[in-house]
Every structure is written in structure tokens, then in C-alpha cells.
Image (spheres, helix red, strand yellow):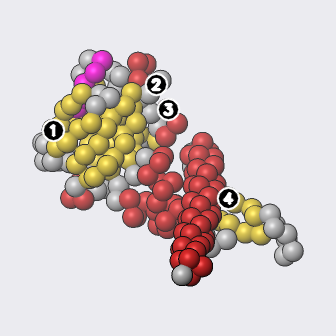
Amino acid sequence: IEILQSKTLMAAVVKRLNLNVNISSKGRVINIDLYDQRPVNFQTFEMNENFFGKSWELTFNGKDQYLLEDKESGKKVSGQLNQLQRNFIGTYKVDKTAYFSRQRNENFSLVFNDPIKVVNSYLSHLSVGVTTKQSTVLRLSFQTTVPKRGQDVLNTLIKVYNEAGLTDKNRTTQNTLDFIDERLKLVTGQLVE
């Protein structure tokens, strides 16, 4: 249970699903989270932490250009879609999604969040428990306002957990093989003498 609630696994989930970037559609009264209908995916690699939590206006100039504008400071960043970007905000890639063509004329709000805070927040919304006292079955739940995000978080968490378990088994197997090889060399050396 503790492993599924570890920061390491949740950090992998946040990175894999790009959960440290929020894109929302600007409404008259409230902004609508576009988790499952984003026009683009922002894949962050290294971000300037000075811009965590800052709201940017995201627009698209044509079919292959994006523009980020900080309305408070007036700073602007533009670049090519589907290409790696390096600028004062950080290193990231902006990829079109299937929703791009029908949403490209709209304005969006975008926020880069501190991945550590996102991990902590997501862990606080995750619940892991045993179904019965003698059961080996776990009950996982994730509280969110966007059901698709909850599904993706839980499914990705299970994938990451399984991958981590497989990596650990492979490491143990390799260490065992290395130990046996060393012992064989030692025993073979003693037999030759």
C-alpha cells in the first residue's frame, strides 16, 4: 500500500501524463479544465521555477505557431508546434492533439505548476485500501473533478508500479547472476590450482 502512495511513483505519473501543466478554456464566468480535450499537449523537460503558478494566455497563430503571453508583465513567447522549445520559461515541447483544428481560434489559460506540489496534491487525493482484512485485493480511488483524469492517474499509477516491480526483479536477478559468475570464477580458479 505504501509503495502505491510513494512520491516516486506519483512523480512518474505526473511526468508521464504532463499533469504539471493545466490548460483551461476561458469562459465568461469560470475557466473550464480541458484535461481530456486539450488542443495541445505541453511536455515539460526543464522549467524555470520562477514561472510556476503564473497564468499565461495561450493562442495560436496559424496552423503551426503558438503564442504565450503573460498579461501582468507583458512577456511573450512564441514558437513552432511539434518542436522542442528552449527559452527563458524552460525546455518543453508543444504537440497538437486531435482537438487542435476545431479549437485553434480560441484563447486558453495555461499554468505551469511546480511538479513537487502537483505530486503532493495528487497523493492527497489518492486513497489506497484493502477490501477486507484477509484480502490481497486493493481498492484504489482518486478524487477529482475530471473523471478521465482520475482514470488516467490510476491506470498510469498501476503501470508505473508494475514497471518498477519488474525493474526491481530484473535488478535482483542480475545481481544474483553476477554473484554466481564471481563464485564460479573463484571456484574454477581454486580447482585449476
Tell me if I can see residue 21 in this picture: yes
Q: In this view, does 56 lie above or below 131?
A: above
Q: Please state if 152 lies on the left or on the right of 132 as rendered.
A: left
Residue 66 is a magenta residue: yes
Mark 3, residue position: 37
Q: Name the residue under label 4.
A: 141
Quadrant location of the C terminus in the rendered image: bottom right
- The part of the image, by quadrant, that contains residue 134 is bottom right
Q: In x, y percent, where is residue 186?
A: 54, 78
Mark 2 and mark 3 lie on one chain; the one further toward the N terminus is 3
Disc 2 to disc 3: CB gap under 8 Å? yes
Is residue 29 something one can see in this rendering?
no
Query: Which mark sits nearer the N-terminus, 4 or 3?
Result: 3
* Amino acid type for the residue under numbered disc 1: Lys
Local crowd size for mark 1, using a 10 Å CA cut-off: few (<14), some (14–19), many (≥20): few
Q: What element carries label 1?
A: strand
Give the amino acid type for the residue marked by disc 3 in the picture: Gln
Q: Which mark is residue 99?
A: 2
Q: Which residue is rendered at x = 22% and y = 55% of the image?
A: 48
- Span colored in magenta: 63-67
In the image, is residue 142 above or below residue 6?
above
* Circle 3: element type: helix
* Residue 182 position (above or below residue 23): below
Q: Where is residue 45 in the image (x, y as percent from the top left)?
A: 32, 49
Question: Which callout, 4 or 1, points at the residue further toward the start of the chain?
Answer: 1
Please name the predominant secondary structure of the magenta segment in the image: strand
Residue at the spot of label 1: 76
State the CA–CA distance, disc 2 to disc 1.
24 Å
Give the mark count. 4
Give yes or no for residue 174 being in the magenta stretch.
Answer: no
Q: Would you call the spot at circle 2 few (<14 residues within 10 Å), some (14-19), or many (20 or more)?
A: few
